[in-house]
């Protein structure tokens, strides 16, 4: 019987009106009837693997699985008959016969879990008490539900080695029940398809092709598979032994300009993990590796500074805050405001930024406020960003063109939008040398000729302006521009190119000529907030002043612009993290940070995002605003308020990005094209991903493995030509420079290209890109 | 390697870019090249616009596909029911012990590759081992080593003669 699209079915002798096109499992769930299940996941395609959800349906032979069978009008279903429960018990016993399950059926289970709290940190899981998922495991719950207390089948331990070499999460496939959720979420939701169900029967395994490591297989370490695993098979290295969180707090990630929504998992006043929003056991894939695995390692980093310190003549020593305020105010009282430079990090919240501004302008009385990220190339890049569209619009464009996007470990919401769009048939064109998670979805992948990147974009402009004939490659781009309203996605690698400014200028022209939309990827958390609430000076101007002796004191707030101490009298380093070793600041003031303070971040489209305080810091660490308040008072400015309410009054209602004028002398750039003698193209990249002036990959080991510095990243195809293995040393030679580097092999870089990431302020090789040749160094 | 690429590219010409073609492509490559190499998986993935993981997941499910170059001689141990009850598992273990390889692999000297099959329709002769195309019925553990040695010596003498 149809009534408003609903059909009538009978479950356990009771009749229900349910929507058509539901599965039996959904129908029972909607009506609060519990059927045990393990492989089912509400947002993934049904798999029918665990067979725990079997039901009886009148007129249907055998026992269909509820998660894969659709309801039909007039269906009569039984979900809990005696035979079903018996079969479920048997099925579960079969599963358990291949799963270390001693603790599940042990008589002493309860006492044991109460009294043996410390013996569980072992490499092998031989029972629940030694499993990272203990008390949070879906298998345990089903065992409890079916009241299993013995296993009739002979037990079999797979004895597979625990996989621990990859960064961020470990894998113990001895615990795997082959529910396939990890495989499906990686494929359907994240659209990365890194892992698959391999082999068959007793030899089944889960993992990348040919047992490669996840790193070699281009896994993005998004952690989706880890979140959805019902067992302890996949476990986060940092969270493994933290147990069940007490609270899930919503907040945001501060590690790039997308400011993804996240939930922070806390326990006993400690951050124990981060996840995307939604049911913690079912969601995953919305974040990049930084939001999923790095934030926790930042706040809990053992390197954090936790007490004020002062540089005494005999060396660095701890002091009390009272002493610290005295020393700081003494110096600042005597200082000439015009000779003090204040540095701000783009990871500060809006409230912290306006507090710092108030302090700088009214207490120190300086106009020298800057941020080390404000380089001369960033200014035109961000000025383009003013026209950036909101992220939701990416999927709605008619075609997408990405320029210099490196999306494997960054900007997850953008790469996901691209992949979803491309799957729907929206043409996607990728320009650049990176082979990232979106590449497989690109209808075309173009790589500008080395040294002719500018010509590449220029050709497009000229073809539009003057109808010039173009190369067949570029005609593909032109076609997209002409046939559809495109969105250009611009990645920050462009900032490092020798001709960045010219390329950016031409991109601006293209946008004007074609009416395309633009999405600019911003690597710095709250850069829009910083730029729109303070008139910053270009960093170069401040550097010039320092070298001319016009600045004698530095107040560094979360920024860490110098590797070595510049020639100044006094430096205050105010940050959650220690200064670089050779900076030798006079005063070190530890501050609270992400997860310990609340505040606001702003995206490029002026969306305000709320950062929440979810844990308390130790009393020896203060917030930036508290430090400013104390110092202002000491310096006779008690009328200035630094509490939250007053600070939020200082934040403009509408935030528009203000960029400083900068007088760059037009200089002739030298570029080099590829030749036979130098057949490879070196791409040098400044290490962009920082937090409070710290390079993320220097603080976090896992990230360092993924994106190592001062190491050549080359494609395995190129490596095989020289018989180069991971870790070998290679001599890299350009026209002018030759230098030895270790090598890692990654498929994320296209063949013919070599990536070199550095945190030095200047590049080693003469041009970027730079034609080079390589030679293996024999040891 | 280039040669392999050429062969594979030629095979692709017969197919359209459609995931449905994965198994036919695998079969064709196996038939013409003898096995599915790492590079083969990579090429197929690129061609079909899927990932290596997806190709490997499917290919490794079917025992008809092998991932290492076949050796000079193929050894197939039947693990069908009839052979199994007559102890073919032990025969397999013995081969593994002598050759130091797992089923699906090839010995380091590229002489032998070991495989398992499920019933070859000669149950009465079980346990059965097929050496190249030669059927050896009523196999005994003792004869495993003998067989291996026999083929090894044959090869040695062949080489002597060649010299
Ligand atoms: S971490 Fe993400 S990309 Fe990697 S295997 Fe898991 S789901 Fe796939
Ligand atoms: S690893 Fe976890 S999610 Fe993946 S199949 Fe095994 S039990 Fe399921
Ligand atoms: S994409 Fe950006 S905001 Fe989102 S999780 Fe990654 S670093 Fe954080
Ligand atoms: S939940 Fe239906 S078969 Fe696993
Ligand atoms: S079982 Fe071995 S031939 Fe039939």
Image (cartoon, rainbow, N blue to C red):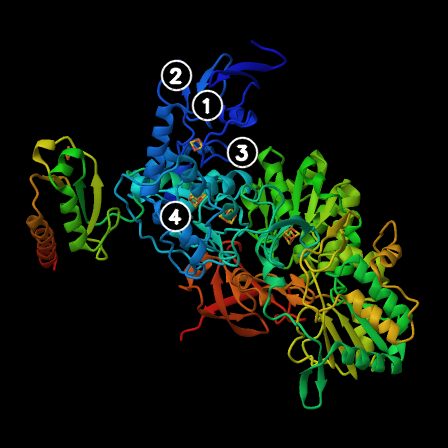
Disc 4 with disc 1 on a shared chain: yes
Tell me the CA gap for discs 1 and 3: 14 Å
For ligand 4, which image quadrant applies?
top left
User: Would residue A186 be found to the left or right of residue A586 on screen?
Assistant: left
Residue bearing mark 4: A175
The reply to whether dot 1 and dot 2 touch (C-beta < 8 Å) is yes
Residue bearing mark 2: A60
Few, some or many residues within 10 Å of mark 2 (<14, 14–19, 20+):
few
The reply to whether dot 4 and dot 1 touch (C-beta < 8 Å) is no
Q: Chain of mark 4?
A: A
Residue A231 in picture, x, y percent from top left: 44, 46
**A402, A47: nearer the viewer:** A47
Q: Is residue A557 above or below residue A123?
A: below
Residue bearing mark 1: A69
Q: Earlier in the sequence, mark 3 or mark 2?
A: 3
Residue A741 in picture, x, y percent from top left: 51, 71
């Amino acid at each position: 019987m149809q009534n408003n699209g609903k059909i009538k079915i009978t479950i356990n002798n009771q009749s229900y009106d349910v929507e058509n096109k539901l599965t039996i499992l959904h129908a029972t769930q909607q009506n609060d009837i519990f059927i045990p299940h393990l492989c089912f996941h509400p947002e993934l395609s049904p798999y029918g693997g665990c067979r725990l959800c079997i039901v009886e349906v009148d007129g249907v032979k055998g026992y269909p699985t509820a998660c894969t069978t659709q309801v039909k009008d007039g269906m009569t279903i039984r979900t809990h008959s005696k035979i079903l429960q018996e079969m479920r018990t048997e099925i579960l016993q079969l599963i358990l016969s291949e799963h270390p399950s001693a603790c599940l059926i042990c008589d002493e289970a309860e006492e044991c879990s109460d009294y043996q709290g410390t013996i569980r940190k072992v490499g092998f899981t031989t029972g629940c008490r030694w499993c990272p998922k203990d008390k949070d495991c879906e298998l345990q719950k089903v065992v409890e539900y079916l009241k299993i207390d013995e296993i009739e089948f002979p037990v079999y331990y797979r004895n597979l080695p625990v996989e621990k070499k990859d960064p961020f999460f470990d894998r113990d496939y001895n615990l795997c029940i082959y529910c396939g959720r990890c495989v499906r979420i990686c494929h359907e939701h994240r659209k990365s398809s890194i892992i698959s169900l391999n082999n068959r029967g007793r030899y089944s395994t889960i993992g990348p092709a040919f047992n490669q490591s996840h790193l070699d297989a281009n896994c993005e370490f998004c952690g989706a598979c880890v979140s959805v695993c019902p067992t302890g098979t996949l476990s986060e290295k940092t969270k493994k032994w933290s147990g069940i969180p007490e609270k899930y707090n919503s907040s945001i990630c501060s590690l790039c300009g997308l400011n993804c929504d996240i939930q922070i998992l806390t326990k006993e006043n400690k951050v124990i993990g981060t996840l995307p929003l939604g049911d913690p056991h079912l969601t995953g894939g919305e974040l990049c590796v930084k939001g999923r695995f790095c934030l926790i390692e930042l706040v809990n980093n053992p390197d954090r500074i936790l007490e004020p310190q002062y540089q005494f003549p005999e060396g660095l020593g701890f002091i009390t805050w009272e002493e610290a305020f005295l020393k700081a105010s003494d110096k600042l009282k005597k200082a000439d405001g015009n000779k003090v430079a204040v540095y701000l990090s783009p990871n500060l919240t809006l409230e912290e930024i306006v507090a710092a501004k108030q302090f700088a302008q009214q207490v120190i009385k300086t106009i020298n406020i800057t941020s080390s990220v404000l380089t001369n190339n960033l200014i035109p890049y961000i000025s383009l960003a003013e026209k950036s569209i909101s992220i939701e619009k990416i999927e709605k464009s008619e075609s997408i063109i990405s320029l210099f996007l490196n999306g494997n470990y960054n900007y997850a919401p953008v790469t996901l939008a691209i992949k979803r769009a491309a799957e729907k048939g929206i043409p996607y064109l990728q320009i650049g040398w990176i082979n990232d998670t979106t590449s497989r979805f690109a209808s075309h992948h173009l790589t500008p000729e080395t040294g002719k990147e500018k010509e590449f974009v220029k050709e497009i402009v000229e073809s539009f302006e003057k109808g010039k004939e173009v190369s067949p490659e570029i005609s593909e781009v032109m076609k997209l521009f002409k046939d559809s309203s495109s969105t250009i996605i611009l990645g920050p690698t462009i900032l490092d190119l020798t001709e960045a400014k010219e390329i950016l200028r031409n991109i601006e022209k293209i946008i004007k000529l074609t009416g395309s939309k633009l999405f600019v990827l911003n690597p710095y958390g709250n850069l829009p907030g910083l730029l729109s609430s303070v008139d910053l000076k270009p960093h170069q101007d401040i550097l010039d002043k320092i070298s001319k002796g016009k600045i004698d004191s530095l107040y560094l707030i979360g920024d860490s612009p110098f590797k070595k101490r510049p020639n100044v009298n006094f430096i205050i380093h105010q940050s959650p993290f220690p200064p670089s070793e050779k900076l030798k600041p006079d005063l070190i003031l530890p501050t609270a940070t992400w997860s310990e303070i609340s505040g606001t971040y702003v995206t490029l489209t002026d969306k305000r995002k709320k950062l929440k305080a979810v844990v308390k810091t130790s009393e020896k660490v203060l917030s930036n605003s508290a430090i400013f308040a104390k110092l202002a008072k000491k310096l006779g400015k008690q009328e200035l308020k630094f509490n939250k309410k007053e600070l939020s009054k200082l934040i403009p209602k509408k935030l528009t990005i203000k960029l400083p004028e900068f007088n760059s002398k037009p200089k002739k750039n030298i570029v080099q094209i590829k030749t036979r003698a130098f057949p490879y193209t070196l791409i040098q990249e400044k290490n962009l991903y920082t937090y409070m002036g710290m390079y993320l990959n220097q603080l976090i080991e896992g990230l360092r493995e993924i994106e190592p510095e001062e190491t050549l990243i080359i494609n395995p195809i190129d490596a095989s030509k020289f018989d180069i293995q991971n870790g070998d040393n290679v001599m890299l030679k350009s026209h002018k420079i030759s230098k030895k580097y270790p090598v890692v092999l990654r498929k994320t870089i296209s063949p013919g290209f070599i990536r070199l990431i550095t945190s030095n302020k200047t590049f080693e090789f003469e041009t970027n890109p730079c034609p080079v040749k390589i030679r293996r160094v024999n040891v | 390697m280039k040669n392999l690429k050429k062969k594979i590219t030629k095979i692709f010409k017969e197919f359209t870019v459609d995931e449905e073609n994965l198994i036919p492509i695998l079969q064709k490559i196996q038939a013409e090249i003898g096995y599915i190499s790492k590079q083969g998986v990579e090429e197929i993935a690129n061609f079909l616009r899927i990932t290596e993981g997806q190709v490997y997941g499917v290919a490794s499910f079917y025992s008809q596909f092998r991932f290492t170059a076949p050796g000079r001689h193929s050894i197939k141990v039947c693990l069908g029911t009839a052979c199994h009850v007559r102890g073919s598992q032990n025969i397999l273990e013995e081969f593994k012990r002598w050759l130091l390889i797992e089923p699906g692999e090839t010995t380091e000297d590229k002489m032998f590759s070991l495989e398992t099959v499920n019933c070859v329709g000669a149950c009465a002769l079980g346990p059965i081992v097929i050496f190249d195309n030669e059927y050896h019925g009523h196999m005994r553990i003792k004869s495993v080593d003998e067989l291996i040695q026999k083929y090894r010596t044959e090869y040695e003498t062949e080489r002597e003669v060649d010299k």
